[in-house]
Image (tube, rainbow, N blue to C red):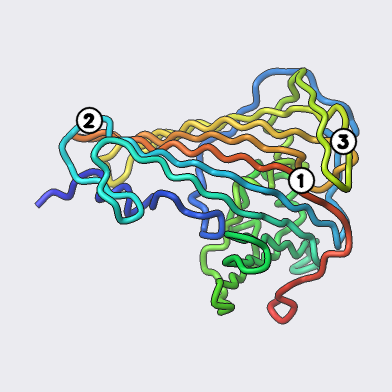
Amino acid sequence: MRRPLVAIFFAIYPPIACGCSAAHLSNGNASAPQSEAGPETVRTRSLPPDGAWVRYDVNETETIEKVSGHFKMKALGDDVEKEKTVATSEIVTLSYVGSLVEDRQPCRWVEVKNVIGDEEGGKVWIRKMLVTEAGLLHNDGYLTDAKVLRAWLQRPDRSITKLDEKRGFPYVFIGTPGSLKHMARSDEMRDFSIPSLRLNAAEAWRGKRDESRSLAGLIKVRTDTEYTAWLHPDLPTGFVRLEWKSTISFSARERATTTKVVEYSLADAGMGARSELPDHN
């Protein structure tokens, strides 16, 4: 009995996944729109020092749409007749918490903390990763298993497991030196202000990723992603704001799409970060 298209692709791409889960990363090519190179203060930024951290308020919407065909589709356990949109929010903190040399490769310990709900009583995931500096200096915003040497995940029940799939997050590493090689500066500038910091004339940098592939030789999958990050030399860790939109289209006998829009807004930044998983190295 032939399984419906949606039963297959939603098993591979579960909808409405929070940022704490292993990200489904594209193997497509990143491309930057043609533009003049940005100022050296941003283009040649170095990796942040140990102890640097940055925190974001994150809002995400994901829309699942049945385009054509007669099949059952579910999102978060609910039947979807035609279209369903789910909105989520979280607090994400990126911290650089240590350095070491392993197999002659300079590496950095990096932690990404996701809090669903308020910081005091929300559900907390923490991922700790040992990342090669070369991975951060030459990545395109997506960290592969080859760049992440080891990784652990602490879940809301405080259980900690070593991860076999070590890939990093597609969002928080936008703005690292490597990712800027795949982006281009636009003429747009914006002023941003948070209680602890004012950043005037932040530069907008834009990137694009397109990918087409086939699943099991039956389902055609196309992913189109566009994103804009605002960067400022006074914020060497991460970006001031990120706007990200990706659309995944699945087609065979039936057709469906899932569209994700993600916005990261700077909430705070500083120094003094220490590992929250100090016994896992």
Residue 199 horizontal side relative to residue 117, left or right:
right
Q: 201 and 208: which one is in front?
A: 201
* Amino acid type assigned to the residue bearing label 2 in the image: Ser
* Amino acid type assigned to the residue bearing label 1 in the image: Gly
Which image quadrant: the C terminus? bottom right
Residue at the disc numbered 1? 238
Residue 107 horizontal side relative to residue 143, left or right:
right
- Image position, residue 178 (x, y; %): 73, 42
Residue at the disc numbered 2? 68
Q: CA distance from mark 3 to mark 1?
A: 13 Å
Q: CA distance from mark 3 to mark 2?
A: 47 Å
- Image position, residue 253 (x, y; %): 19, 34
- Image position, residue 210 (x, y; %): 50, 31
Question: Which residue shows up at 78% across the image and 52% down it?
Answer: 54
Q: Secondary structure at mark 3?
A: strand
Residue 149 horizontal side relative to residue 99, left or right:
left
| Mark 2 residue crowding within 10 angstroms, few (<14) / some (14–19) / many (20+) | few
Q: Is residue 250 visible?
A: no
* Amino acid type assigned to the residue bearing label 3 in the image: Leu
Identify the mark nearer the N-term, 2 or 1: 2
Q: Secondary structure at mark 1?
A: loop
Question: Which residue shows up at 90% across the image and 34% down it?
Answer: 41
Residue 207 horizontal side relative to residue 212, left or right:
right
- Image position, residue 143 (x, y; %): 62, 51
Residue at the disc numbered 3? 199
